[in-house]
Image (cartoon, rainbow, N blue to C red):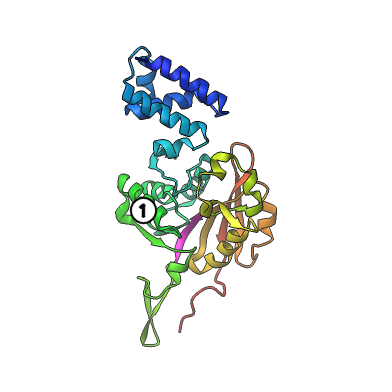
Amino acid sequence: MRTLRQALEWARRRLEHAGVEEPRRTASTLLAHVLHKDDLYILTRPEEPLSEAAWEDFTHIVERRARGEPLPYITGHREFFGLDFLVTPDVLIPRPETELIVEAVLERATTADRLLIDVGTGSGCLAVTLAVHLPWMRVLALDISEAALAVARHNAERHGVRERIEFLKSDLFSALEAAGQPTRSRERGGTQPVPPRADFIVANPPYISESELPTLPREVRDYEPRIALIAGPDAADVQRRLFAQSPKFLRPGGYLICEMGYGQYPSLLEHLDAHVWEVVEVKRDLQGIERTLVLRRLAKSASDPKTA
């Protein structure tokens, strides 16, 4: 019967041979997952025997990782801004650079703010994290994928914020455009739908072009959902739509905060209407890449609802 030490050494060599980064740490995480323990347990009990059933399960998931399947899809978990999120292949894996969006909101939010819209919520990492840190805020979480919304709802329940987040299947803001919205005003003797007006809109939209797909790492290219990665022939297609549609759902003075890809910032500036948007900040990630664009909506524009 193998010990934990022997199992880890085998896994380290297998993962190293497959070109997996941090093979020793990955092996420990996978073994802890199989045993339903933490890394400290694995570290402090190297001579503990591993059952044949556990060895079989361990070798199976090590091979999955060696073939390129991302670790969070194997374990079903990923940490984001200090919270544990459940993830499946239906959602993009939350990444550290996306935490910059959370930081940008928390730096600007006040108790006077009431509504935040998360466009393309995926796992719900942004919607849930911001709901946890801003307990007075109501959140609308939108995604075109019903499977992704199911994951996001589950994460909201796990972190105790489900009652403050409304999840809607939506291509960008399409669900909010539909008739029968909860927010209405009486105009000319009738009841007319009025779009919800947010204090913040956040988004981590697809920003990779179809031609870039073959250049992505295999873990991303072969496993993560393309609908959350690929914008289309033009990498900025979804972002352009976001810039054009957001003013209708954002109050004057409100913020649109979105993620962008490597080297995209100069080209995105060309698509910003200077009469609508003010660039407040561009946040760089740990590699120095311009990653998060913070925009403030200027005074009333043509997208504002007409009043009688």
| Residue positioned 63% across, 57% down in the render | 236
Q: Quadrant of residue 268?
A: bottom right
* Quarter occupied by the N terminus: top left
**For mark 1, what is the residue?**
150
Q: Depth check: 257 or 98 in front?
A: 98
Q: Between residues 40 and 137, which one lies in front from this camera angle?
A: 40
Is 142 colored magenta in this rendering?
no
| Above-or-below relation of 32 to 163 | above
Secondary structure, mark 1, is helix
Residue 165, image x, y percentages: 35, 56
What number of labels is visible?
A: 1
- The amino acid pointed to by label 1 is Ala
- Reply yes or no: does residue 199 show up in magenta: yes
Magenta residues? 197-204
Whole-percent x, y for residue 159 in the image: 32, 45
Q: Which residue occupies 42% across, 49% down?
A: 123
In this rendering, the answer to whether 19 lies above or below 235 is: above
What is the quadrant of residue 210 in the picture? bottom right
Q: Nearer the viewer, residue 83 or 73?
A: 73
Q: Which quadrant of the figure has residue 3? A: top left
In the rendered image, which quarter contains the C terminus? bottom left
Is residue 111 visible from the viewing direction of this image? no
Foreground residue among 198 and 29? 29
Query: Residue sitting at 31 percent across and 45 percent down?
Result: 158
Q: Residue 161: where, in percent of width, then height?
A: 32, 50
Which SS type dominates the magenta stretch?
strand
User: Measured along the vertical axis of the image, is residue 103 above or below residue 15?
Assistant: below
User: Where does the image place residue 31, in percent across and percent down from the top left?
Assistant: 39, 25
The reply to whether residue 267 is visible in this rendering is yes
